[in-house]
Amino acid sequence: MSLKAFHVFFVAVCMVFAMGMGFWGIRDFRESGMNQSLYLGVGAFAACVVLGVYGVWFLKKLRHFSYV
């Protein structure tokens, strides 16, 4: 596996974990009403968006390199 393929995989996994943390934070806020959980959820969703933008930028930058 090339470094490019590993990097794309790692960013995708981080996006999935950030999305899961965001859902967990929002759900916890709805159950407990703690503002910290809301901030955590919103921040995790923002991190997911930032990671997505970074992933697209990375793929465009290194499009001429193969995945092998």
Image (spheres, grey):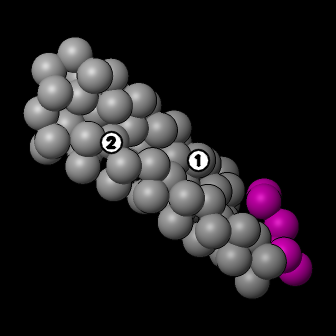
The answer to whether residue 64 is magenta is yes
Instruction: Name the residue rendered at 22%, 16% in the picture.
Output: 31
| Residue 12's disc number | 1
Q: Main secondary structure of the magenta part?
A: loop
- The magenta stretch is 63-68
| The one of 65 and 41 positioned closer to us in this rendering | 41
Give percent across and percent down for residue 25: 29, 33
Q: Amino acid at mark 2?
A: Gly
> Which secondary structure, mark 2?
helix
> Which secondary structure, mark 1?
helix
Which sits earlier in the primary sequence, circle 1 or circle 2?
A: 1
Determine whether 21 is above or below 11 in the image: above
Question: Disc 2 designates what residue?
Answer: 41
Instruction: Name the residue rendered at 14%, 43% in the picture.
Output: 36
Give percent across and percent down for residue 62: 76, 79
Q: Quadrant of the C terminus?
A: bottom right
* Residue 14 can be seen, yes or no: no
- Occupied quadrant, residue 26: top left
Q: Residue furthest top?
A: 31
Instruction: Name the residue rendered at 52%, 66% in the picture.
Output: 50
Determine whether 24 is above or below 63 in the image: above
Left or right of 68: which side holds 30?
left
* Residue 38 can be seen, yes or no: yes
| The one of 22 and 31 positioned closer to us in this rendering | 31
| The one of 51 and 1 positioned closer to us in this rendering | 51
Circle nearer the viewer, 1 or 2: 2
Q: Amino acid at mark 1?
A: Ala
